[in-house]
Structures are given as C-alpha cells and as structure tokens.
Image (tube, rainbow, N blue to C red):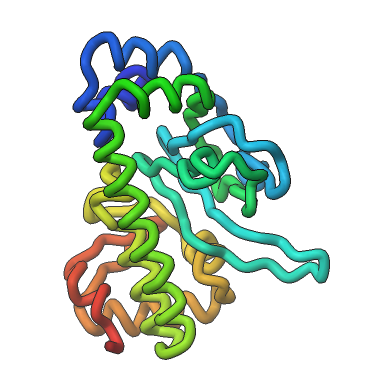
Amino acid sequence: MPTLAEALRESAWGRELTEEEFGRALAGTVERRIEAGAFVCMKGEPVEHWMGVVDGLVKMASCWITGKTTTFTGLATGGWFGEGSLLKTETRKYDVMALRESRVAYMNRATFQWLMDHSIPFNRFLITQLNERLGQFIGMMEHERLLDLDARLARNLAAMFNPVLYPGTGRELQISQEEIGFLAGLSRQRVNQSLKTLQEANLLRLEYGKLIILDLDGLRNYGG
C-alpha cells in the first residue's frame, strides 16, 4: 500500500510539481479511511477540499427527497474529483460514498488555490481533467438514451479504465458484481447476465471478485 506522500507524488499532477510545490501539496493534504457505505462527502455541504482516491472504490451519486438515487460515476484508485465545485465556490451538488473501505486524500482549499496560482503543470492537469470529465458525462447521457442495458454496462465499465481520470487502474479491477450494480444502477442478477454476455464477446474475463479487461476499445464501442 502506498503512503500518502507516495500516492501524491505518483499522481498525474504530483509528478510535475517542483519540490517546493509538492511540499505545499503534501502539507495541505490529509488522508482519511472511509468505511464501506460511509460518506466521503455530502450533497449540500460547503466545499473545502479537493479529493483523491488513494486506494479503494467510491461512487458519485445524488439522492432525492423522493428516495430515488442516481449514480453519476465510479471513482477508482488514482482518481481525483471536486475541482469544479472548488472553482465555483458553491455547495456540493452530489454525494460521494465508499463502496468498500477506502483511503481518501483531502487537499484543503488554500493549498489547491496556491497550486493554481503557482504551478502551470497543475493548471494543465486541471484543464485536461475537466475536459475529460465533461466528455464522460456527455457520453453517459447519450448511453442512457440510446443503448440497451448490456451496452450501457459495457460503457460504464470502460469509463472505469479511463487513463486520464483513473491512472491507477490497470486492465484488472478488484470489484464485485454487487459493486458494479451500484455503479450502473442495475440489480446484481442483471449485472451477472450482462457480464456473461460481454465475456462471451471476448471483451472481458470474469474471475472471483475481479474483472480482467481483454478489449477496452471493444467495451467502449459495444452496441454502438
């Protein structure tokens, strides 16, 4: 397991910082262990941190007063989130919950803003991150409206292997079918059926508690 310092230095943005910049980033960041089912952050609260998944799996979702819940995306090891809310200085518009016990880094607002003011590479990272996230959400809207359940699940899984948003994820992902169901908004039984269909198409291989991606481009374009 990497330490917090190792995780920050190995991140896509941390690798580009000077020693001074990295020292400020590390000093302004704390790590918290979040139990499965607990909140990483909550809708409606003031936004005071930029967050990254050091190790684990969380989901970004919104719960309505009617009891209905919609999941926007999963966030795996190496993924950072919340920069948009920090930039707009608004209250948080979504919940983030841990699907399993996770280690999450919290960088405070002052440190985030200092890096924006002093580091060109950090700003480049943020632009790339925001652009990639925008493309992800536009794609999700398209998938919800045009694709069947098997194709929607394939695209959801492919999004978890985005090298920009989740650089810590290789071609293997430790994830249960129940966790996939939480991310895709499907029952465990329906997830099992779709995964078998994708496995028969030689796009992935199922192992106990784990997915191995065989054809990432095939997943990204499945059903299209």
Pick the residue in front: 131 or 76: 131
Place residue 153 in its image quadrant: bottom left
Q: Residue at x 29, y 57 (%)?
A: 161
User: How far across and how far down the image is residue 20, in percent?
Assistant: 28, 9
Q: Residue furthest right?
A: 65
Pick the residue in front: 24 or 114: 114
User: How far across and how far down the image is residue 49, in percent?
Assistant: 55, 31
Q: Residue at x 58, y 75 (%)?
A: 187
User: How far across and how far down the image is residue 5, in percent?
Assistant: 35, 17
Pick the residue in front: 24 or 218: 24
Q: Residue at x 22, y 31 (%)?
A: 121
> In the displayed structure, would residue 199 be above or below residue 147?
above
The N terminus lies in which quarter of the figure? top left
> In the displayed structure, would residue 120 be above or below residue 224?
above
Place residue 142 in its image quadrant: bottom left
Pick the residue in front: 25 or 99: 25
User: How far across and how far down the image is residue 151, in percent?
Assistant: 36, 83
The C terminus lies in which quarter of the figure? bottom left
Q: How many numbered tags mark residues here?
A: 0
Q: Is residue 168 left or right of residue 89?
A: left
> In the displayed structure, would residue 44 be above or below residue 105?
below
Q: Is residue 175 left or right of residue 129?
A: right
Q: Is residue 122 left or right of residue 185?
A: left
